[in-house]
């Protein structure tokens, strides 16, 4: 990208870290989507890399398993010519009692510019970013999923996927205005759902949540009504609505898109479901149920999918509806955009 064009893109960007989409304005979503669209159009596979992050180092600190997010961030960094290193908790000095902050500072001392952090506890990326700032370290923290709290890059890639579906040539937040997006499943345990609630309502979509009360408490209807603790005001002036339905028969009519969520078995400590069979009977999506939307609509899932539970196998394999692989593809340009904004932004400001 030309230096002038880069400076223009970066001029309105004010985030040193990306922890939570609650802090994103409409202009932030526009910037990320525009950049991702440019990166997606560039032939950057194999040896044809963009030089944008040459000399920068991204370190991934993953304390929870990941198939998509980690490799997508690493690929994104490489496509921008950054160096990449990854940390594996079991063979690190954390097992000898080193604190997370000292571990992070060790990587910063090696030259890390961006730390991509996933942790099973909500708040770890935020605390790490705050403590690194306090120590005067010039490093950006990118949250790659923390407990039930937030998964911003997934929320952004879902937004990008929907925006590209509705407006392939110009996938901006406006493409979502007035759309009815149904999110079905284990909302309670889903950081993906929380990030999507911020992103979709910011763009003016009407979000319909659907699930049993054990996995979808009624309080989610007011999820975006107040900014989270520590954030004085909502950067978005007017948000779309959130409504809750307990059955797909009520939720699906008129939908423009359906997002299914994984049942997070590893986070369910009580018997929140009578059985997986019963869940599939009531909330599993199949062709017949999807027809309730009244028109052909796209189906999303952040993965990994419990095949035959959230989604019937035939629907998951049906390219006429399924955007799951498209989500994975779009994850790379979205993460390139985030890395670019955080790492190149620091460089350009310093230059
Ligand atoms: N991969 C996503 C996450 O890490 C979704 C999931 O695991 O269900 O949150």
Image (cartoon, rainbow, N blue to C red):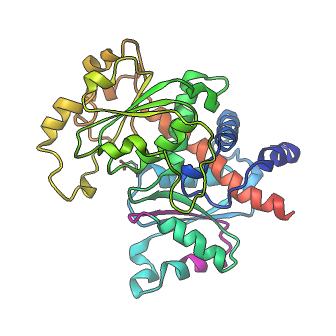
Q: Out of 89 and 10, give the one closest to the viewer.
A: 10
Residue found at x 48% / y 46%: 195
**Residue 99 sits above or below residue 227 on the image:** below
Q: Quadrant of the C terminus?
A: bottom right
Is residue 2 covered in magenta? no
Residue nearer the viewer, 12 or 299: 12
- Left or right: 275 as drawn, with respect to 133: left
Q: Indicate left or right for 301 with 23 as reference.
A: left
Q: Residue at x 16, y 30 (%)?
A: 281
Left or right of 233 on screen, residue 311: left
Picture coordinates of residue 206 (x, y %)? 47, 29
Where residue 241 appears, as percent x and y from the top left, is 47, 33
- Is residue 11 in sight in this rendering? yes
Give the residue at x 51% y 43%.
198
Residue 232 in the image: x percent, y percent? Answer: 60, 57
| Image: magenta residue range | 104-122
- Give the vertical position of 295 relative to 22 (above or below): above
Rendering quarter of residue 259: top left
């Amino acid at each position: 990208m030309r230096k002038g064009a880069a400076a223009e893109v970066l001029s309105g960007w004010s985030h040193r870290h990306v922890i939570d989409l609650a802090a994103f304005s409409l202009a932030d979503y526009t910037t990320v989507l525009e950049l991702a669209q440019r990166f997606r159009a560039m032939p950057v596979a194999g040896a044809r890399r963009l030089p944008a992050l040459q000399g920068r180092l991204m370190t991934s600190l993953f304390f929870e398993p990941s198939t998509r997010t980690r490799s997508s961030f690493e690929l994104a960094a490489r496509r921008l010519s950054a160096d990449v290193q990854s940390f594996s908790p079991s063979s690190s000095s954390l097992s000898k009692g080193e604190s997370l902050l000292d571990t992070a500072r060790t990587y910063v001392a090696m030259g890390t510019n961006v730390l991509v952090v996933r942790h099973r506890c909500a708040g770890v990326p935020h605390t790490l970013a705050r403590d690194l700032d306090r120590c005067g370290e010039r490093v950006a923290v990118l949250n790659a999923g923390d407990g039930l709290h937030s998964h911003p890059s997934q929320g952004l890639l879902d937004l990008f996927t929907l925006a590209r579906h509705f407006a392939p040539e110009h996938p901006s937040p406006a493409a979502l205005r007035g759309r009815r997006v149904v999110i079905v499943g284990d909302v309670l345990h889903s950081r993906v759902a929380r990030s999507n609630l911020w992103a979709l309502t910011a763009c003016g979509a009407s979000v319909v949540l659907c699930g049993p009360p054990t996995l979808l408490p009624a309080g989610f209807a007011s999820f975006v009504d107040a900014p989270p603790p520590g954030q004085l005001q909502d950067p978005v002036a007017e948000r779309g609505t959130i409504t809750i339905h307990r059955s797909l028969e009520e939720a699906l009519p008129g939908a423009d898109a359906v997002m299914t969520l994984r049942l997070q078995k590893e986070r369910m400590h009580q018997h929140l479901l009578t059985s997986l069979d019963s869940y599939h009977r009531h909330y599993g999506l199949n062709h017949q149920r999807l027809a309730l939307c009244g028109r052909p609509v796209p189906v999303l899932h952040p993965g990994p999918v419990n095949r035959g539970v959230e989604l019937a196998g035939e629907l998951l394999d049906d390219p006429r509806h399924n955007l799951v692989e498209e989500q994975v593809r779009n994850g790379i340009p979205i993460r390139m955009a985030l890395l670019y904004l955080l790492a190149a932004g620091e460089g350009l400001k310093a230059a």
